Amino acid sequence: MGMTITEKILAKHANLDSVKAGQFIEANVDIALGNDITAPLAIKEFKKLGIKKVFDKNKVSLIPDHFTPNKDIKSAEQSKILREFAKDQDLTHYYDQADVGVEHVLLPEKGIVVPGDLVIGADSHTCTYGALGAFSTGVGSTDLATTMAIGKVWLKVPETIKFVITGKLPQGVYGKDIILHIIGIIGVGGALYRAMEFTGDTIENLNMADRMTICNMAIEAGGKSGIITPDAITEEYVKSRAQRPYEFFASDPDAKYLEVIHIDTTKLEPKIAFPHLPSNIKNISEAKNIKIDQVVIGSCTNGRIEDLRIAANILKGKTVNENTRLLIIPTTPLIYKQAMEEGLFSIFLDAKATISPPTCGPCLGGHMGVLAKGEKALTTTNRNFVGRMGHPESEVYLCSPAVAAASAIKGEIVAP
Amino acid sequence: MIFKGKVHKYGDNVNTDEIIPARYLNTSDEAELAAHCMEDIDIDFPKNVQPGDIIVAGENFGCGSSREHAPLAIKASNVSCVIAQSFARIFFRNCINMGLPILESNFYQEIKSGDEIKIDLDTGIITRLRDNKKFKTEKFPEFMQNIINAGGLMSYVKNKI
């Protein structure tokens, strides 16, 4: 019996010839990640183990990106715990101050995560790295603590749902629309405990930014991981970045799948996730007269340079509606600089957008753009749960950067 | 181990933003987290919850973020056990790892908010006390049971170091 790409990566990291779905393994971890919300708890637990040093200072990455630049005294204290621990442990991949970026954009950008890796992160969107052909999954702080100590994590080998996505994408339709469409079909628990393998010619033609957007939101369908078979586009992305040797894995033709779902994208419309679940998906043509108070373009889902270019292309020479606030968050220092040097900042500023430093900030209602009671936000982020971006009686709609930019100009949800 | 308590019942897809909103994640202080547990969907929960009470929910409980503050807030509210039709993966894992008892069961329709129930973790039998009706739950796989028996992942790993 053949194996899926996920099973192959897990087998290799468990030093086994093969694994199958349902099997419990203890796997070696290439990168263990934590942020300013989850790492303080993990550090507290780690210290209880009585171990002096983390298992490998090159394999533990701490990135204070959620409430930074620190929003208040308490979050400053949290960041301080990371800073002191990182210094004490001499961690190679600790990023702070001017070096900090949104973790799931920063790690691939810097080549810290590479194809074939097994990555665990105390952040649910750790599944993003599947876009590189790595197995990556979100865990909690206790998992991070024990992994920092022993370099291993317990995992149950997941069953895989294969998505075969074919057809040319219509104008104005992007990776974000594909993943929202999928979550709309299978629901927020549709891939519970499962790996989601995205295949087909549509995926093969996507750039890395769109692939990362798709894998990033696997968790919104309940998935343990999302993964895309690495190819020439992956190679092009990683070859100049990779800080370690990498390995491309691919599923065997006779690999076993729990289910295969076919999706034709030729008639796909831009999608909107209506409040209050990412699975509450409607076509943009169904979103009528929805006035928007705030638009956010950013996050680990859609805050890459490609996303900013799409937004700038639409915003060029236009102005944001007087009743709407547009917030743009370049997610890493490199993207920030690129956007500035490419002239995107001038376009954004002329359009009356606000440019934020890299942060997760408003995506989780943390800071830098929190919603008031009754306000509506349209955002390129990943979750629209009750109270996600602020007041429990505010509303969040999810969309692509193109829809976000066009809607900011109009002041209501419109097609790009 | 046996738990007895009053049921606080919720629907499907209760997410981690509802269990503990991100605006309170600038701390990992347990008492502070408990003071805001469930407040966006049940403002009275922190006030009403009594030691030993039990949360009963539908599908995909704990979906969303990986924040361990969610099971921590529930545990610090002195909830003895969470029973759901299904759990979101990271939440499930966090509960096993930190030792918050959870059970998967399909008796959701049979229980009302305010019902008193008894849970026998060793046999997996849940009893509805108003009429003594019993419901059976599935046992955990052996690997997870070993972590639970060790008292959570920290103790499990400590034994191995």
Image (spheres, grey):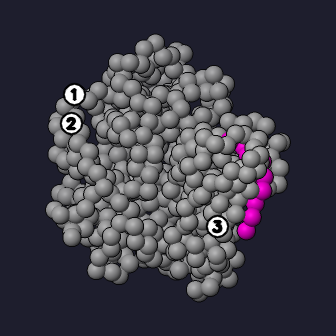
Residue at mark 2: chain: A
| Label 2 and label 1 in one chain | yes
The answer to whether the residues at label 1 and label 3 have Cβ atoms under 8 Å apart is no
Residue B93 locus on image (x, y percent) = 55, 62
Q: Is residue A256 above or below residue B77?
A: below
Crowding near the residue tagged with mark 3, few <14, some 14–19, many ≥20 C-alpha atoms within 10 Å: few
Q: Nearer the viewer, residue B53 or A269?
A: B53
Alpha-carbon span between mark 3 and mark 2: 48 Å
Q: Which mark is residue B123?
A: 3
The answer to whether the residues at label 2 and label 1 have Cβ atoms under 8 Å apart is yes
Q: Mark 3 belongs to which amino acid?
A: Thr
Q: Nearer the viewer, residue A252 or A332?
A: A252
Alpha-carbon span between mark 2 and mark 1: 7 Å
Is A386 on the left or on the right of A245, as rendered? right
> In this picture, which residue range is highlighted in magenta?
B1-9
Provide the residue designation for mark 1. Answer: A267
Q: Is residue A173 magenta?
A: no
Provide the residue designation for mark 2. Answer: A264
Q: Mark 1 belongs to which amino acid?
A: Lys
